[in-house]
Image (cartoon, rainbow, N blue to C red):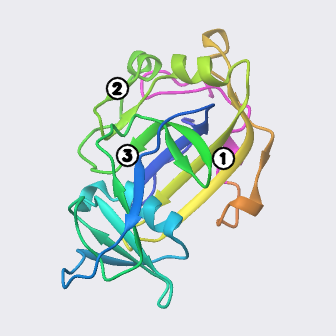
Amino acid sequence: MSRFLLAVGFSLCLLITVVSAETVFFTDEATQTTSTPTTVASGGSLTECALKCKLQFLKGCSAAAFVSGTQKCLLADTTNADFPGGVAVRKQAASTQDPVQIEGRTFKIIQHRSKGLLSFGRGWTEYEDGFGDETDFWIGLRKIHQLTGSSPKLLRVEAVTWSDELYVCEYSGFTVADASTNYTMTYTSYLSGSSNTTTDSLADNKGKQFSTIDRDNNQ
């Protein structure tokens, strides 16, 4: 059974590039305060801290700051949280299904799993049409084909483990064919330069048809 990717760890997000959209975070100067952020995590930049905050729905992250001296992310559960100097990023009131910007590129989220309350063990019809809520969802095979079928996109996979480790994989030329092919997925190449994993996790699924618990197209 092949669903393009098996979810691992605590939070999973699949994104594809799109043309334009509003950002999910805004940046401002953090003020001096004695407030204590809810979580401290490792990080290499403000962008990485913003990404960790975006994926931390289970812990309710709404604002983040990067401490360059210690290479740490400070994550807070309220949007108006204050940090001890520097620059902070704060979530705008936006749906998880809205496009997001990462390192100057705009992405459309096609799958998001973080809370662990929504079952992804669904049948063929639901995977075609899409399902979920504003936080955890799958947008549907039809929509993914509309986005990528005639215009292959860059696919970005983000996964955060229970220990707050962020793993990123990127793939060029990602495309999903139409229903007549059972939504066969393929891509051009695994982009090791912008990924921090050692292997291509999608290699076994490349060129295969989509399958669900009630319809195995890869027997």
Residue 131 has which mark? 2
Q: Residue furthest right?
A: 188
Which residues, given as a range, are shown in magenta? Answer: 201-219
Q: Nearer the viewer, mark 2 or mark 1?
A: 2
203 to 28, vertically: above or below: above
- Look at label 3 and name its amino acid: Arg
153 or 20: which is nearer to us? 20
Give the distance between the C-alpha atoms of the residues marked 2 and 3, in whole angstroms.
12 Å
35 or 70: which is nearer to us? 35
97 to 85, vertically: above or below: above
Mark 2 or mark 3: whose residue is earlier in sequence:
3
Identified at 27% across, 82% down, the residue is: 32
Q: At numbered mark 2, what does the secondary structure look like: helix, strand or loop? A: strand
- Look at label 1 and name its amino acid: Leu
Place residue 18 in its image quadrant. top right
Circle 3 residue? 113
Give the distance between the C-alpha atoms of the residues marked 2 and 1, in whole angstroms.
23 Å
Place of residue 54 in the rendered image (x, y in percent of width and height, measured from the top left):
39, 55
- Look at label 2 and name its amino acid: Phe
Place of residue 180 in the rendered image (x, y in percent of width and height, measured from the top left):
65, 9
Residue 202 has which mark? 1
2 to 11, vertically: above or below: above
Identified at 41% across, 42% down, the residue is: 112
Place of residue 141 in the rendered image (x, y in percent of width and height, measured from the top left):
52, 22
Identified at 80% across, 46% down, the residue is: 189
Q: Which quadrant is home to the C terminus?
A: top right
Q: At numbered mark 1, what does the secondary structure look like: helix, strand or loop? A: loop
